[in-house]
Amino acid sequence: QSVLTQPPSVSAAPGQKVTISCSGITSNIGNNFVSWYQQVPGATPRLLIYYNNNRPSGVPDRFSGSKSGTSATLGISGLQTGDEADYYCGTWDSSLSAVVFGGGTKLTVL
Amino acid sequence: EVHLVESGGGLVQPGGALRLSCAASGFNFSSYEMNWVRQAPGKGLEWVSYISRSGNTRYYADSVKGRFTTSRDNARNTLFLQMDSLRVDDTAIYYCARAHYCDSWGQGTLVTVSS
């Protein structure tokens, strides 16, 4: 059971927008920055969003992040079949002194 | 270009030990915190350990505390993970990742614990 809670799966049609939620508590999301990662099947995880809403160079602006209180959200607009992957949120937990991840959300582009 | 290359994985019996290495290049290794993250077959990401830039501060997941030790050699641009008393449920791909928010990842090394 993961410290951060994500929906197991989401789906949407090509061109549509989808959001993935990540729920935590004060000691993790509430007091720390959130990151988001994409893992295409068979590949290494890739950082998509850091410090809640910042994109590393090379990540399209179709990907966006936000945080409110103890929850964070990843948004993906203009969905493409290549976006099919597992998505993970992560942050530091000040009480556990540990990095914590969500259980992952599988995105299907129908 | 940032490059992280893990090595040292393999098949080991329960109770055995392995030492993983992560060779870093393309950036100033000593300026970055580092993490180890693992992924069991078909499962999600699980953080294993963190080490500060100097190596003086280290944190571990409860599941590996007391059995795993992370260290670094900044002169050799290398991160290590000493894994002792290995269990079947330690079987996973082990990744090293740069910075506290894991902005770059290696390709991983597979550790299989089985009799």
Image (spheres, coloured by chain):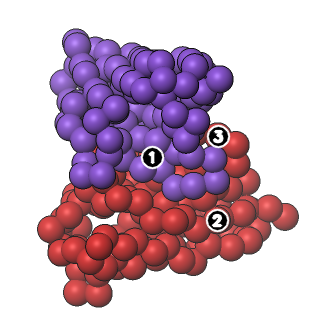
Amino acid bearing label 2: Leu
Residue under numbered circle 2 = B110
Question: What residue is rendered at 60% in x and 58% in y?
Answer: B93
How far apart marks 1 and 2 lie (CA) works out to: 15 Å
| Left or right for B48, reference A64 | right
How far apart marks 2 and 3 lie (CA) works out to: 14 Å
Please provide percent x and percent y for residue A56: 25, 48
Callout 3: SS: loop
Position of the N terminus of chain B, as image quadrant, is: bottom left
Q: Which chain carries label 3?
A: B
Callout 2: SS: strand
Q: In which quarter of the image is residue A1?
A: top right
Position of the C terminus of chain B, as image quadrant, is: bottom right
Residue under numbered circle 1 = B47
Q: Which residue lies furthest to the right in this view?
A: B115
A97 over A103 or under it: above or below = below
Q: Which chain is red?
A: B
Callout 1: SS: strand
Q: Earlier in the sequence, mark 2 or mark 3?
A: 3
Q: Which of marks 1 and 2 is nearer the N terminus?
A: 1
How far apart marks 1 and 3 lie (CA) works out to: 13 Å
